[in-house]
Amino acid sequence: MIKLRFKGQLELSEKDILRFYPELKSFLKEIKSKGWSYMFTDVVGEAEVMLDAEKLDFKLNYYPPRIDEFEEEGRYTLEAVIGEKPPAVLRVLSVTGFKIEISSKHSWRTVTIDPQKKNITYNQDVLYNLTFSKKERPRKLSEAREIYEIVNFLISEKGYRFEDEYIIEKYKQLVDLFEKPYKFDLSIELTVKDEEKVPGWDELIDQLSRFFYERGLLMKLKMKQDEFFFRKKPIP
């Protein structure tokens, strides 16, 4: 048997994670008090594991240089196939990252958050779910309101922010459905003045979305069907 120190994705219990982040206990208790449930995902950390060296099946891999990252040399990796069962974890040394998925009564995995960055990284597309409903998704508007209540709780009471413009756009759907806000269209014509400073389309839209959000406005980019893929091209 050999003892190895392992860094990367870990399957850990809630108790193991909270040992490093005890300040989360009151937040999780508050989620439960509202009738919601949660689960930890994407846990990253470091642990010591025990492995039987004689039962390991090693494989040597070679990866050529990546052109997109301008690498000049390739790299070798040694892959060990452990088997059907995970190795025994002797000791969890650290937990450096994780996310929490929050579910409501009628909506499973409604919202995903990164508590360390206080970011909302995902929330369900309400209109899509109501159109193509599954068992674990809202089937009517009153059930879809549960998504709105979770997101609103995170933003208004806990100070969470949206990770990107896609999440903001989905939040706009919730506001449009449940708050009946005042809406108006705004046309913007842009001229390239300094090519070196111009970002890509995704970055530009994300910056605009954040700009308006910080000023109390929710933005949605309106595009014709034949213009959808144009956004993926670099700005001329």
Image: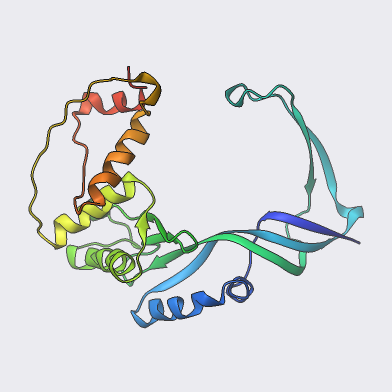
Residue 155 spot, x, y in % from top left: 31, 64
Q: Is residue 151 visible?
A: yes
Q: Position of residue 147 (x, y in %)?
A: 28, 64
| Quarter that holds the C terminus | top left
Q: Residue furthest front?
A: 194
Q: Quadrant of residue 20?
A: bottom right
Coloration mode: rainbow
Q: Residue at x 7, y 53 (%)?
A: 182
> Where residue 160 appears, x then y in whole percent?
36, 62
Q: Is residue 128 visible?
A: no
Q: Residue 180, relative to residue 233: is it above or below?
A: below
**Quadrant of the image containing the N terminus:** bottom right
Residue at 32 percent across and 40 percent down: it is: 207
**Vertical comparison of 199 with 35: above or below:** above
Above-or-below relation of 12 to 8: below
Q: Quadrant of residue 91?
A: bottom right
Which residue shows up at 37% across the image and 29% down it?
A: 199
- Image label count: 0
> Is residue 150 toward the left or the right of residue 71 in the image?
left
